[in-house]
Amino acid sequence: MKRRRILQAGLGLALGTPLFAAVKENKLDLAAEVLQIASDSGQVESSALYVRRKDEVFAKSFGRATSVDASFLLASISKPISVAAIMTLFDAGEFKLDDPVRKFLPEFRGDGRDTITMRQLFTHNSGLPDQLPENARLRAAHSPLSEFVTAAIRTPLLFAAGSKYSYSSMAILLAAEVAQRIFGQPIATLVDDTVCKPLRLKHTALGIGDLDRESLVRCQLENAAPESGSGNAETKSWDWNSDYWRKLGVPWGGAHGSAGDVAQFLDTFLHPSGKVLQPETANLMIRNHNRKNMRPRGLGFDLGSPLNGPARDTVFGHTGSTGTLCWADPMSDSVCVVLTTLPGRAAEPHPRNVTSKHVAEAVG
């Protein structure tokens, strides 16, 4: 609890000093000050902020992140990146959103699986769980991604497909498996070929790819997500910082990337150029596909207020359990990326969320 109070105390101090009087007219400076306080206090080891509004860019790194080009473990920001790569196969006519998953994974059938569609995998209403019951066992055994796929195909559904919303990393895994079978190569290769290379994302990869292992920012593990081992010393061989997890490149949470690269990725949806997806497909990814009274979701993207950005339904982006957050706002033509190493569940308020809200105020 001590760490959770540091940010609040630090902000209280900042808001009551001449420093705040000097920066209150510039919310971006105040946003950066949140991360600086969190870094100086030791609450956050490393962080980076990248904001673009129209033609203006504000970027800064903090703590052990010596540059805004530092590569963080993005966690679930990996989902829209992976889905964008998968959707290049949609553009190629290889699948339709309402195709049943069993068309591509014949063994995925029975007990309600037959009607699950590709769209439902992307929008988290397939009935698949977020994590597998055997997640810890598979990670402790350093299992390959194929064993996670086999288990996800067989795992019991939580509810009938399409009946409710329930966040599901395993749904994204099976969507990636469909892409692998169509593409004939690993999902990490598809991401590199269709997203990273066309956008010249030099500090991003699903897994490690060609990134320098020593250059990757270390994740903090205290109060980490349960599925990552929660910082337990006994899970060191498979936690967020392990070579095993870094290299595995899970499509639901295993991408590394820099703040600038994530901003560049979001920009391709604000200003579709055809480099990654056809403009109409890019627009399809950032609009809501879920029915009324169900949480809005794009294809791989989260939408609206959960992103702590501008209070508009058209805002799209994602957050990650390692302490990451990104959003883009079409109305103000702005992008915000906040990457930290403090687990998302480790602080309330979390510095990324406070920072994001200041940025939202700054861009109007």
Image (cartoon, rainbow, N blue to C red):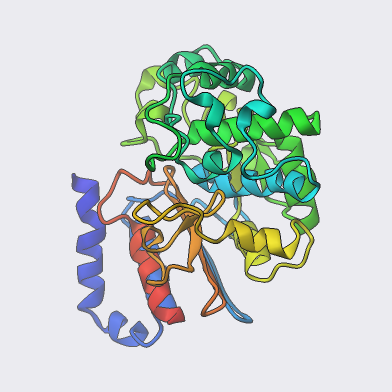
Please report the residue visible at 45 percent of the width from the left and 20 percent of the height from the top. 135
Front one among 5 and 266: 266
Q: Quadrant of the N terminus?
A: top left
Give x and y (percent) for residue 92: 81, 47
Q: Quadrant of the C terminus?
A: bottom left
- Report the side of 188 relative to 344 (left or right): right
Give x and y (percent) for residue 170: 51, 30
- Compared to residue 69, the image places residue 131 above or below, namely above
Front one among 252 and 175: 175
Give x and y (percent) for residue 66: 56, 56
Front one among 56 and 148: 148
Give x and y (percent) for residue 21: 29, 86
- Compared to residue 15, the image places residue 341 above or below, namely above
Total numbered labels placed on residues in the image = 0
Please report the residue visible at 76 percent of the width from the left and 67 percent of the height from the top. 273
- Report the side of 295 relative to 252 (left or right): left
Q: Is residue 246 visible?
A: no
Please report the residue visible at 68 percent of the width from the left and 31 percent of the height from the top. 178
- Report the side of 191 relative to 69 (left or right): right
Q: Is residue 123 visible?
A: yes
- Compared to residue 207, the image places residue 296 above or below, namely below
Please report the residue visible at 76 percent of the width from the left and 36 percent of the height from the top. 189
Asked where in the image residue 125 lies, by quadrant, the reply is: top left
